[in-house]
Image (tube, grey):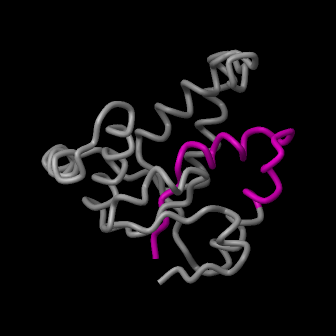
């Protein structure tokens, strides 16, 4: 089974000082051990760059562009990158209309549209509540994975 990684998971994995670093790594390891394929889409890399290069005092990682690029290269070595496709847009349009999405959650709807397009049903995220409205996917937190959440 493929499991999409959300940006907030990648950010925590890039910061060993983050309070959730160890649990994130453990959850990823458990998914790997369960024969899950961990995947990403370009959107999570765009978002990662934004957080990675934002100053620490603004809730970022404070990396310079070269450091952020190096982190992204490491992510690309670890996880399969699925392509953005034109077919994502009509799915996104249906989602934002069906679920009456307003404002920033439109970005989450785009991630869900990419998941639907690539037949991915599970998302690993620290923001499970942001994805509750979408019946098409299951949002798992790293804690639920560590607690033995059923992946099917």
The answer to whether residue 9 is magenta is yes
Q: Is residue 78 above or below residue 143?
A: above
Q: Residue at x 36, y 58 (%)?
A: 133
Q: Which residue, as the protein is rendered here, is positioned at the far right? A: 17
Q: Is residue 108 left or right of residue 47?
A: left
Q: Residue at x 13, y 47 (%)?
A: 90
Question: How many numbered discs, if any?
Answer: 0
Q: Position of residue 23 (x, y in %)?
A: 78, 59
Q: Position of residue 131 (x, y in %)?
A: 43, 55
Locate residue 61: give its quadrant. top right
Q: Is residue 27 above or below residue 7?
A: below
Q: Is residue 115 above or below residue 146?
A: above
Q: Is residue 82 left or right of residue 84?
A: right
**142 or 40, which is in the foreground?**
142
The answer to whether residue 46 is magenta is no
Q: Residue at x 59, y 38 (%)?
A: 73
Q: Position of residue 115 (x, y in %)?
A: 34, 58
Q: Residue at x 63, y 72 (%)?
A: 31
* Residue interval drawn in magenta: 1-25
């Amino acid at each position: 089974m493929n499991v999409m990684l959300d940006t907030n998971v990648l950010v925590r994995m890039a910061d060993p000082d983050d309070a959730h670093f160890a649990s994130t790594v453990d959850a990823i390891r458990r998914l790997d051990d369960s024969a899950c394929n961990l995947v990403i889409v370009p959107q999570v890399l765009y978002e990662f760059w934004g957080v990675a290069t934002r100053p620490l005092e603004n809730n970022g990682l404070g990396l310079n562009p070269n450091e952020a690029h190096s982190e992204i290269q490491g992510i690309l070595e670890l996880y399969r990158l699925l392509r953005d496709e034109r077919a994502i847009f009509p799915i996104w349009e249906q989602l934002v209309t069906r679920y009456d999405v307003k404002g920033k959650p439109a970005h989450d709807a785009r991630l869900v549209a990419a998941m639907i397009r690539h037949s991915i049903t599970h998302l690993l995220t620290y923001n499970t509540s942001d994805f509750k409205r979408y019946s098409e996917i299951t949002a798992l937190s790293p804690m639920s994975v560590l607690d033995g959440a059923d992946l099917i």
